[in-house]
Image (cartoon, helix red, strand yellow):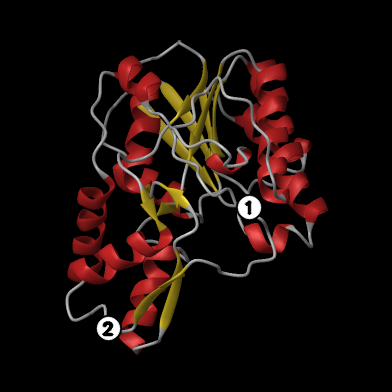
Amino acid sequence: MKQLLVTGANGQLAKCIQDAVSSSSDMNFIFTTREQLDVTNKASIQEIFSKNNITHCINTAAYTNVEKAESEPEKAFAINAEGAKNLAEVCAENGTILIHVSTDYVFDGSKTSTYLETDQPNPINVYGASKLAGEAHVQRICKKHFILRTSWLYSQYGHNFLNTIRKHGKAGTQLKVTTEQTGTPTNANDLAAVLLLLVENEQIDFGLYHFSNAGTATWYDFAKEILTRSSELNLSNLAKTEHYRTFAKRPEYSVLSTNKIEKMLNIKILDWKKSLASVIVILETT
């Protein structure tokens, strides 16, 4: 039986994985919160592995506050880099397949065409640098690994761009959203399904992959689509701005090529607008 350990159980991606889990008899899941498993503490990881025959580990535990990472680099690197290193070491010791989630922010945004897995990373903020360091540890230490870079993740859970825009839309807040960054909004439910597909299909083509929904958008485009598709919300309070001051630099262009993972899994990835609509339906019917 496949025994899956999923870290970061309180995060939106892990919650989407829980929703996607089927009643398959050959898969058993252990979801751990930070209180139950601290990835910065290797002994904490070893303890769980010693009590369970973990065949796969999906690491969704991460420090994801891009702005705050600039003033807390030690904390960001502890979780995103050293935490990944600890998991990689324990997975390698136990012959466990490690599935590690990373980010489009490992790139500097200087390209004008989609980023390939073979493109040279060059992060321009602490968050991106910490995630790239985590990737390097996983690649070096654990041969049986999948690294999936994703972008602009949102879902029906937690604090994310979708829920923030809807909250402000309901409150009638005047919104100014930037047009200077281009990427792809990605539904965490779609990413969760792909992560589980890697396990279910018993994939062994280990390595680095990109996953996002199809298409491109600016943050303004994303906000406009959210308000357009949400009932009782309108665009009257939404305005675009070319410049939006942030503490952390962000890549101006970070669209990911997903050809490699589509080919491996024989899947067709959904357009971001259609996928967004499905999450808004969930939010408005629950």
Q: Position of residue 182 (x, y in %)?
A: 44, 50
Q: Classify residue 159 as left or right of residue 21.
A: right
Mark 1 residue type = Arg
Q: Quadrant of residue 197?
A: top left
Mark 2: few/some/many CA within 10 Å (<14, 14-19, 20+): few
Compared with 274, 113 (above or below) is: above
Between 217 and 271, the residue placed more toward the observer is: 217
Q: Quadrant of residue 233?
A: bottom left
Q: Which label belongs to residue 236?
A: 2
Q: Which label belongs to residue 34?
A: 1
Q: Position of residue 46 (x, y in %)?
A: 71, 31
How far apart marks 2 and 1 lie (CA) works out to: 41 Å
The kind of secondary structure element at disc 1 is loop
Q: Is residue 286 at least partly visible in the picture? A: no
Mark 2 residue type = Ser
Quadrant assignment for the N terminus? top left
Quadrant assignment for the C terminus? bottom left
Q: Residue drawn 40% across and 32% down?
A: 195
Compared with 167, 92 (above or below) is: above
Q: Position of residue 119 (x, y in %)?
A: 57, 24
The kind of secondary structure element at disc 2 is loop
Q: Residue drawn 38% across and 76% down?
A: 239
Between 112 and 154, the residue placed more toward the observer is: 112
Q: Position of residue 72 (x, y in %)?
A: 78, 59
Disc 2 and disc 1 in contact, CB within 8 angstroms: no
Between 252 and 25, the residue placed more toward the observer is: 252
Q: Classify residue 229 as left or right of residue 33.
A: left
Compared with 4, 160 (above or below) is: below
